[in-house]
Amino acid sequence: MACVNPDGTLSPSARTLLRAADVLQTPAELAQRTGLPLFRIRASVRELIEANLLQEENGRYQRTQAAVALLGE
């Protein structure tokens, strides 16, 4: 399942993940916070990094300013 739709909008699970990634967290922490399965978090993290919507620091992830703008927060 794609995180970013062809029209540039986010899938519901991507929106949920990005909203939860307001501070640096591990994939396991994101899974616990969102209720999404860990395998989905891991796949989404890769896609959202490529889209410049998540950034990684020492195995922990946080949304970027681009994600904040896209979410309207």
Image (cartoon, rainbow, N blue to C red):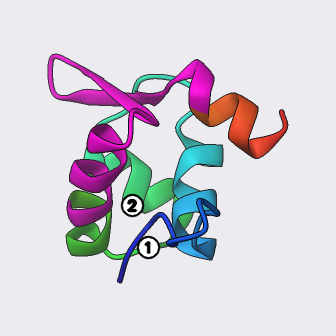
Nearer to us in this view, 26 or 57: 57
Q: Is residue 52 magenta?
A: yes
**Other-residue count near label 1 (Cα within 10 Å), few / some / many at <14 / 14–19 / ≥20:** some
In this view, which residue lies farthest toward the left? Answer: 58
**Spot occupied by residue 11 in the image (x, y as percentages of width and height):** 57, 72
Q: Is residue 21 magenta?
A: no
Range drawn in magenta: 43-66
**Spot occupied by residue 6 in the image (x, y as percentages of width and height):** 50, 72
In this view, which residue lies farthest toward the bottom? Answer: 1
Q: Which mark is residue 31?
A: 2
* Residue annotated with mark 1: 36
The amino acid type, in three-letter code, at marker 1 is Leu
**Left or right: 9 in relation to 33:** right
In this view, which residue lies farthest toward the right? Answer: 72
Residue plotted at (27% across, 42% down)? 50
Residue plotted at (73% across, 31% down)? 69
**Left or right: 52 in relation to 38:** right
